Amino acid sequence: MFAAVLVLGAATLAALAAAAPSASPTAGPAAVAVGPKSRCTTPDEAPLTLFHGGRLQFIIVANAGAPAVSETALAVGQPEQTADYRLTKLAAAEWRFQSLRVDRPNRTVLHRVQIQVSFSDGSQEVVRCDVYVIHRSGGAVSAGANCVPKALRILHGQAGVLRIVPIPGSAPILSTGRTNSQPAATPNYQILRLAGNRFSFRSKKVDPPPRVETYVVRIRVKYGRPKAIVASLITKCVVLVEHAAPATAFVVQVKTTYDHDAAPQPDVCVDIATSPPQPGAQASVRMLGPIEQQAAQGQEQNVVLDSRGAGRARFLVNAIGTYQIAAMVTSASGTTSTAGVTINNASPSGNCGP
């Protein structure tokens, strides 16, 4: 019979963080609030959680749209070492948190670490890294794992991979597998076991309307060594399956006008229309010619269609002959449609205008 500590879920940890005071000193009243441009995470995007006595490697990364992180340092008022932990800088934006206090009773302690972040554009901010240390009593076993990513997001009909990663300081993972209550396949999905404590989740149900469906995958994780299992716990993985609206087919129409005006130069205009209209669609228009010449010239223009789902590409030409024109339009939903036409500009056909 073995004893094992129960690893608290993210919601429980968040509640503890709100209810309990920080076990670490803060930077004081003048401290900068949590920065909006960067965040703390682990190389595999696992939670900042470890067992007492363990080591946790974490990194500072820029949020979407923010400049790159160029350097980090301990913020003003943030000690390098306390009675509870030691911080070691490993690289420009990489740190190690070493838990020093190993004691009972069972509890989870929040340590708030302040890191000064410098960005490639010269700006700076202070980011707060919330690190949770799980303490267990003398007779309990430190065992627990995270599911990476924390929430796997895929499109309906597609597949993704879940990985079981031990919490730093945990007993080693011996084996992983589905729990007895976790089916390998349902009408909605299929789960396959892969090497390296990984599992493939494939969505099988492809249908409208647009929505996000949430699935919880339960993985039985055994810790220890062969013939010496010290814990057998369940790690829950979350999968978010996004159902998209069915793509709407549309038709592309191409109409050309061309002239021989010398000022500024003879040209060919390609007018694009879509039915039903596809406002905001991206059109790539290519013209090749004159094809009678051995070295025919190719030109290409990209056009964003207006609110009517229409647009114009204009090409300057310096020779009379046959030209091949192809237009490929990609709608906002990702659907693509094409159209083409061949013209000979020996005789003018309309005028492109100014």
Image (cartoon, grey):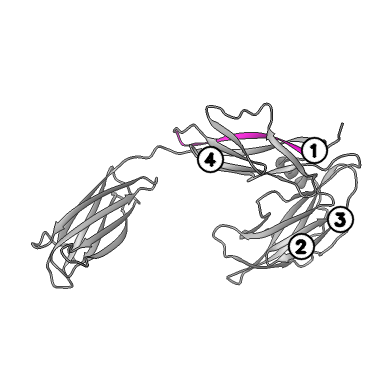
Proximity of marks 1 and 4: CB atoms separated by less than 8 Å: no
| In the image, residue 340 above or below residue 297 | above
What amino acid is labelled 2 in the image?
Pro
What residue span does the magenta drawing correspond to?
A: 209-225
Q: Earlier in the sequence, mark 2 or mark 1?
A: 2
Question: Does 289 lie within the magenta span?
Answer: no
Q: What element carries label 1?
A: loop
Label 1 CA crowd tier, 10 Å (few <14, some 14–19, many 20+): few
Q: Earlier in the sequence, mark 1 or mark 3?
A: 3
Which residue shows up at 86% across the image and 41% down it?
A: 106
Label 2 CA crowd tier, 10 Å (few <14, some 14–19, many 20+): few
Which residue shows up at 67% across the image and 42% down it?
A: 197
Proximity of marks 2 and 1: CB atoms separated by less than 8 Å: no
Q: In which quarter of the image is residue 92?
A: bottom right
Per the image, the residue denoted by label 1 is: 226
Q: Quadrant of residue 344?
A: bottom left
Residue 242, horizontal then vertical, whole percent = 51, 39
Per the image, the residue denoted by label 3 is: 100
- In-image side of 114 versus 216 (left or right): right
Q: How far apart are marks 1 and 4 (CA)?
A: 32 Å
Magenta span dominant secondary structure: strand
Q: Distance between the residues labelled 3 and 2?
A: 27 Å
